């Protein structure tokens, strides 16, 4: 990977790699957290890494098309997830995945 | 007192949002242009990280909010899984660029992962994660194989199916690794891809979903078409003139050899796996 990056220096904007530790931390939070707000923020941080990464090659004009496509569809998916979280919060009044009210019904 | 139906609605909405990120069937349209046109180091991350992370998140959401799985949610999983296997196979059949074929194979395999969740037992979680890990291993092999061949300016040599024809003349060992990897992705018997697909299908058969298992296998035959075309282009065409001038990256070559070895080692564990399967499903 390192040698490949050096050989491709013309095609890579290096600012992207500043996001990599942020993306890794967001992945850990996504896998481990029970808080819905923490999950959503981690999901957005991880998505920002990929939105900027997909758009980071400014040599190809076709790539802006796919980057905008990816950004809009990712925003739609985030909206769906947030809507699900909102319904869950409105029903149980808890911002956690394993909330106690889930087991009180029936 | 939470209403179960409202919680089910929220679960389905969250699953639909995660299906966008995973690239499941009705939400798969971003996969192929993004895989093709993004910078390839980002594409490599895009193959592995979202599939692993969002599938684990989907499992946690389903287990915490809708477990044991109700009839409506198993219908959602059937629709997503069978649809992605069918549409991934059909779209991959007409593609000739390697990154698009990788995207199509990702759609197909994540569909199998979703299908493994339908019975809704603890073992189905284990089988789904086993399938996901085996798929990530095989797609790592695929990506490392493409990264093996770069020209002096650092551009990829292998872009289309037709470019695969010069591999056997340069490095027949590496071409054989690619053939083994693609047989495994297609689900041919001794390899890890077969074992994980068999686990999913036996699990569906054993828990009263035979129709889903049979249609999954039927739709997966479309994806076998493009795996076999990859194999035939890599190994069963005559040599071309350009072959001897291809550079090979040693690091990526080691990565391909390592993951193929991990793939083949599963042949040695096959008797044990069969005993495990027998104990698992028939006792």
Image (spheres, grey):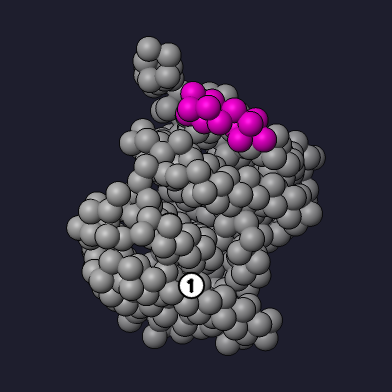
| Residue B279 can be seen in this image | yes
Relative placement, left or right, of B252 versus B247 is: left
Span of residues in magenta: B203-215
Height in image: B124 above or below B243?
above
Dividing the picture into quadrants, the one containing residue A82 is: bottom left
**Other-residue count near label 1 (Cα within 10 Å), few / some / many at <14 / 14–19 / ≥20:** many
Residue B7 falls within the magenta-colored stretch: no
Location of mark 1 (residue)? A80
Q: Where is residue B189 in the image (x, y as percent from the top left)?
A: 57, 24
Q: Is B188 or B152 nearer to us in this picture?
A: B188
Q: Is mark 1 on a helix, strand or loop?
A: helix
Q: Position of residue B75 (x, y in %)?
A: 56, 46
Q: In which quarter of the image is the N terminus of chain A?
A: bottom left
Q: Which residue is rendered at x = 47% and y = 77% of the image?
A: A79
The structure residue drawn at horizontal position 43% and vertical position 74%, both measured from the top left corner, is: A83
Q: Which percent across, then down, holds residue B279?
A: 37, 15
Q: Is A73 or B189 nearer to us in this picture?
A: A73
Residue A29 in sight here: no
Give the answer, above or below, for where B214 lies relative to B153.
Answer: above
Residue at image location 33% in from the left, 36% down from the top? B122
């Amino acid at each position: 990977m390192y040698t490949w990056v050096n050989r491709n220096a013309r095609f890579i904007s290096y600012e992207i790699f500043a996001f990599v530790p942020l993306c890794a931390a967001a992945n850990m939070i996504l896998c481990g957290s029970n808080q819905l707000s923490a999950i959503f923020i981690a999901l957005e941080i991880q998505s920002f890494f990929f939105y900027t990464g997909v758009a980071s090659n400014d040599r190809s004009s076709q790539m802006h098309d796919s980057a905008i496509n990816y950004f809009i569809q990712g925003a739609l998916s985030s909206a769906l997830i947030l809507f699900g979280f909102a319904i869950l919060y409105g029903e149980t009044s808890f911002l956690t995945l394993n909330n106690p009210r889930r087991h009180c019904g029936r | 007192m939470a209403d179960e139906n409202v919680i089910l609605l929220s679960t389905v909405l969250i699953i639909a949002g995660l299906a966008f990120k995973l690239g499941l069937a009705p939400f798969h349209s971003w996969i192929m242009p993004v895989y093709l046109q993004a910078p390839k180091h980002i594409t490599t991350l895009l193959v592995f990280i979202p599939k692993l992370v969002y599938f684990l998140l989907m499992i946690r959401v389903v287990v915490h909010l809708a477990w044991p799985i109700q009839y409506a949610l198993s219908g959602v999983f059937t629709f997503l899984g069978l649809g992605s296997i069918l549409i991934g196979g059909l779209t991959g059949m007409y593609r000739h660029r390697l990154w698009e074929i990788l995207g199509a194979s990702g759609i197909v395999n994540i569909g199998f992962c979703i299908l493994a969740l339908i019975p809704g037992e603890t073992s189905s979680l284990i089988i789904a994660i086993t399938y996901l890990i085996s798929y990530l291993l095989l797609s790592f092999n695929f990506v490392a194989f493409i990264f093996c061949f770069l020209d002096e300016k650092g551009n990829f040599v292998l872009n289309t199916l037709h470019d695969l024809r010069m591999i056997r003349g340069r490095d027949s060992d590496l071409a054989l690794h690619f053939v083994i990897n693609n047989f495994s992705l297609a689900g041919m018997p001794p390899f890890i891809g077969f074992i994980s697909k068999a686990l999913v299908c036996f699990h569906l058969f054993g828990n009263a979903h035979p129709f889903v298992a049979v249609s999954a296998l039927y739709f997966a035959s479309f994806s076998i078409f493009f795996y076999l075309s990859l194999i035939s282009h890599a190994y069963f065409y005559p040599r071309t003139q350009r072959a001897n001038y291809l550079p090979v990256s040693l690091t990526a070559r080691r990565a391909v050899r390592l993951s193929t070895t991990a793939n083949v080692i599963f042949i040695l564990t096959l008797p044990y796996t069969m005993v495990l399967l027998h104990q698992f499903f028939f006792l």
